[in-house]
Image (spheres, rainbow, N blue to C red):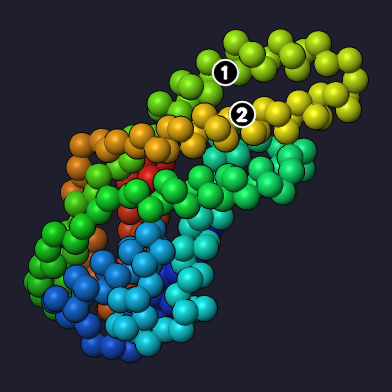
Amino acid sequence: MKKLVPFFVIFCLLLSGCGFAGENYRNYVTAMLDCTYHDEKEEYQRLTNASHLNSEVFFTAEKNSLAQRLCDTYGIKSDKISEETKKGFSALAESILKKTKYTVRDVLHENDNYTVVLVISPVDFWNKAQDSVRKYYYSEFLHKYKIAPTREDADLLEEEYAFRVLEILMNEAEQIDYLEPVVYTCTIQNNTVSPDDWTAIDKLVLHLS
């Protein structure tokens, strides 16, 4: 996912300059995950001496990416909706991210490499939300949209649709549950975690296809 590229670059540079090992990797990976998903920056800043501005970029990028994914998934047309509704989708993304669950279970050392073992509980959000939105779409919105007399009327309905979908998704986010925990391992080689590993972690945490 393109949004993670700056994350990898900074992550690799920090590790390569620090001589991290064992428990240090556990603490760092945990801090990086907390910074990215929970907007908890203090430990990351303590470990890396990063500024508040530099550390908040991770959560902001993750939130913006998820907000866009939500709009794309449910057919929300960003050019047809209000700034207030756009902010609502950003708040929704933040709510989902802060409920993500993961832990660094272990760090294994073998042949000068370190393997980080993560236990991730994917959020159970998308399937339930999809069902709720589909029900609204077919029972209410589609008929109104089809009989809209003008394009302008149809465009106005896009805002109504987006706002109602946002309400539905907010309700689902408040009731987020979790799927069965998944164990994921990634090997740190040359003081780096590969972009493919971080993309895989992102998909597991948020239960993305």
Instruction: Pick the quarter of the image with the C terminus.
Output: top left
The image shows residue 115 at horizontal and vertical percentages of 17, 66
Q: Amino acid at mark 1?
A: Tyr
Identify which residue is drawn at 60% across, 13% down: 138
Taking the spot 74% from the left edge, 14% from the top edge, the residue there is: 144
What is the crowding at mark 1: few (fewer than 14 residues within 10 Å), some, or many (at least 20)?
some
On the image, which quarter does residue 206 sit in? top left
Q: Report, in whole angstroms, how far the alpha carbon at label 2 lies from the one at label 1.
A: 9 Å
Quadrant in which residue 187 is drawn: bottom left
Quadrant in the rendering for residue 20: bottom left
Marks 2 and 1: CB-CB under 8 Å? yes
Return the residue nearer the eye: 70 or 88.
88
* Residue closer to the observer: 86 or 106: 86
* The disc label shown at residue 164, or none: 2
Q: Amino acid at mark 2?
A: Arg
Total number of numbered labels?
2
- Residue 14 is left or right of residue 151, and the answer is left
Residue at (42, 84) in percent of width and height:
50
For disc 1, the marked residue is 136
In this rendering, would 47 be left or right of 104?
right
Crowdedness near tag 2: few (<14), some (14–19) or many (≥20) residues, C-alpha within 10 Å: some
Looking at the rendered structure, the secondary structure element under dot 1 is helix
Left or right for 140, reference 112: right
Q: Secondary structure at mark 2?
A: helix
Q: Please determine whether, in this image, residue 209 is positioned above or below residue 2.
A: above
Give the x, y percent position of residue 73: 56, 35
Q: Locate residue 129, reporting x and y percent.
A: 45, 28
Q: Is residue 200 visible?
A: no
Residue 137 appears in the rendering: yes
